Image (tube, coloured by chain):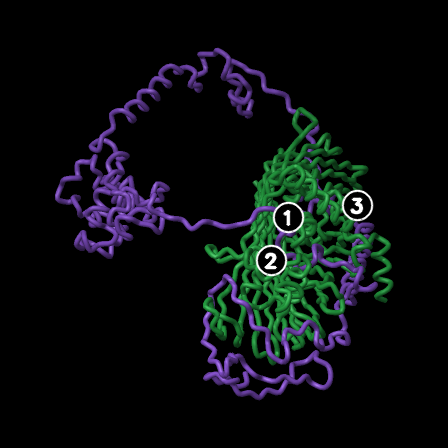
Chain colours: A green, B purple
Amino acid sequence: MNRIFLFFFLGLGSLSAVHGQIYSYSNLAKSFSTAYSTSSPRMQSMGGVHSTLGADISSISGNPAGLGFYNRSEVSLGVGYVSATTESTYLAETSSKTNSFVQVPIFGLVLGSPAEFSASQWRGSFGVAYSRQVIFAQPISISGVNNRSSLLDRFIEKANDKGATGQSLDDEFNSYGKTADSPEAVAYQAYLINPNAKTGGAPFQRYEPNLPTRQLGTADNEGALSQWDISYGASYLSKFYVGLGLHFSKINATSTTFWQEEFVGANYVAGLQYQEKLVNTGSGISATLGMIYKLSSNLRASLALHTPMFFDQMNERYDATLNPRVFGIPSFDSKGNPITITRVGAVKLTPNEFTYQLTTPFKISGGAAYFFGKRGLLSLDLEYVNYPGMRVSSAELSATDNINFENKYNGQTQKNFQSALNIKLGTEIRLSANFNLRGGVATWGNSYSPTYDSIDRTVLQISGGLGYRTNQFYIDLTAYQRTSKDAFTPYALKSSADYSSASLNLTSMQFMIGGGVYF
Amino acid sequence: MKNHLMLFLLLVGLIFIQACTVVQNNSSDATSQSKLVADDLYDNPVQTAVIPKKKKKSDYLDFQDESTLIEEENGLAEAAEPNYLNSRAVYANQYDQGFANGFSSGLMNANPWNSWYTNPFISFGTGFGSRWASPLASWRLQDPYYYGSMSSMYGPMMYSSFAYQSSFMMNPYFYDPFYRMSAFSNPYNSMYGGMYGSMNGFGMYGSTNIYNYYGALNSSYASYNSNNYNVVDPVQISRRGAREDAMSNRYGGENYNNAPRGNSNSYNQNGTNQQRVNSSASEVGGEAVVAPSRRNTNYEYRAAPQNNSVPQYQNRTESYSAPSTNYGGSSGGSSGGSSGGGSSTRGPR
């Protein structure tokens, strides 16, 4: 039966989407470009279909032509309780972590045109809304006993690769600011890795590398891509609808990863804690042009073009701190006397700051909706996202460096990503004069190219909801559950036998309540 | 997946039922519509049979006509029509002049005796004067250089017995823990730093505040002032540039690369998680490598006594033996240990 189910959806299009790690710039761009839930509670309960329907606050950020359906003015607000859970399996151990919070995904104002035709055959409505397009919420927690490697092996490989010596790593340490310029230098200053006694450099070593390592890792994401939308939608003879929207976006994303190791049975180094923090902020602008046409009184079709969003200045700051825990490290003091180091303070990586420009992909959305008189509707939305069109560049760099920067990361983008088709299907049934019942399914197409990896990152969302409406106000209740798979590699080594990845099952649920008042 | 299937089938069922319902109601669509509340998603705008004609202007009253003529909306007010008594166009000049007079009078002639706006003590029974300041901003009321201050040096209260150096008393919204404390003892309201407001002068951090850019509280420079040349900021060190070129990317530049990982980029199976043996062991002849000294001296240490010129380091000497099976579970590991020559003894964890 499951196969039949899968076959049905595979017939609609490819299925997966990615919760990639956000450290690479191409992956960052992907993360900032993938919007899942962007509409009002009413539309969310119908799987997020709002491209063709109109007369909803979602039209302001989605298809502005939908504003042309308004016969009155409205103030609307939605509040959501988000619960994002990740179950991980790492080295045969299963862990789970949940991140829950309350948010305001959307609110806005529509100044509608009166219900009567004026002398002109054109009518129009103006809308202003705030919406959260992307939410960074998914946490990760993994743990396991690794008999093959430690994070220190990653640092050792990096030190070996660049031909570092103890002296060169020492030179990377700034005694005044107490920071080191590279993570291998940080590990060196934390007395966790040592140069070869004979060569003074590679191969670098660590204490008791044959012992198993108890590893615990977490990653926490917070922040959102939010935007202010200003849109106008007009209708001609209540037959043809056209709209234009401007979107002013703001990214505020923080990702914190924490990695802890404990060397089981160790005598020299007990373990370490490595914490990284990446903060990205920036603001961007984009526009949407949309159209809706009533083919008949029961059938509508729509098309909307979403320009890429251009972020003029993305600011990022990256911090890392290594906190070693030692039992006793044999060493010398400055006079050459033998000592046993019993405690080493935390060593920080020199913070890294950077500004760059980001362009998100071009999108086309459209769909069709069939109305069962006034008793209900069935709507289908299709969304095509050109992920390979994502671009990063940096005006901060010199012309040559910028070309190298663009070639590296835009090359990664084009190699790793492919265009995706997102499909949403939703229905609403007007049970009585006041009550509506809604449901929907949605899939987000595979945006990672097949050459990237073979992980099945299917994203599937099931949603439902109930609405109560009067002529003066409405209240909507919505719940959805979104599931997908992904993986997490805490660090990579040259030999794939020496490191492991965690498989992840991602679940994101949101309970929303929304309401609005007509005036 | 089974749950999803059930939900999907439920959805399809609802759509099916809905389709049936529509057939039943089609014939009486108009009736059913009337039962439903208005929803712009479904409803078309009401098209009136006849587009209403614009009302013609008439100088005569028509008692049969119930429509209201709004002159501004119909563009009539702009026409020179002095006979309309309900238009202020009749008294246009008087109206403007009256406004201008009132504005000028209020602006130029107000004083604390005739205007609530300029007299903070006229409260209209609300308990707050017109220039009530919020508790958050109330510190400004103590600023003698601020015109609106209770003890403003520009105001008549400055030298009165009510205000002089007792302005805290007059502001019920500000609690001063150092009220009337000796000026030399009060770290916030120093005689020199507070009243006369010299930058940092004998403020909280003395006359040379090297810690921040804020002057003594209650001084005229209490707020942020970037001119404190005594502050020596630590040099902020940061690197600039693309992060992954010089910094750590623990993930090898990308999330994954399936090239070295076979056709399934999944985590390694437990079977491959076998214990490492003698890979780049740092121990030389059973002794650990002695870490060479380095720039970072932020550590604690003990002197290692020497025995026949051989340093006796005081690390742990626990022995670890791997469990006999695999290592996916908790570590076994026997421990036994006495310290190796040092004075410290550490037992098993």
Amino acid type, residue under disc 3 in the picture:
Tyr
Q: Are the numbered discs 3 and 2 placed on the same chain, yes or no?
A: yes
Quarter of the image with the N terminus of chain A is: bottom right
Quarter of the image with the C terminus of chain A is: top right
* Apparent side of residue B153 relative to residue A235 in the rendered image (left or right): left
Tell me the residue that label 2 is attached to.
A221
Q: Position of residue A312 (x, y in %)?
A: 61, 39
Helix, strand or loop under label 1: strand
Tell me the residue that label 3 is attached to.
A370
Tell me the residue that label 1 is attached to.
A133
Q: Which residue is drawn at the image coordinates 71% and 57% (left, top)?
A: B255
Labels 3 and 2 touching (C-beta < 8 A): no
Q: Which of A37 and B270 is in front in this view?
A: B270
Amino acid type, residue under disc 2 in the picture:
Asn
Q: Which residue is drawn at the image coordinates 20% and 32% (left, top)?
A: B113
Q: How far apart are marks 1 and 3 (CA)?
A: 27 Å
Q: How far apart are marks 1 and 2 (CA)?
A: 15 Å
Q: Distance between the residues labelled 3 and 2?
A: 39 Å
Q: Residue furthest front?
A: B308
Q: Position of residue B339 (x, y in %)?
A: 52, 85
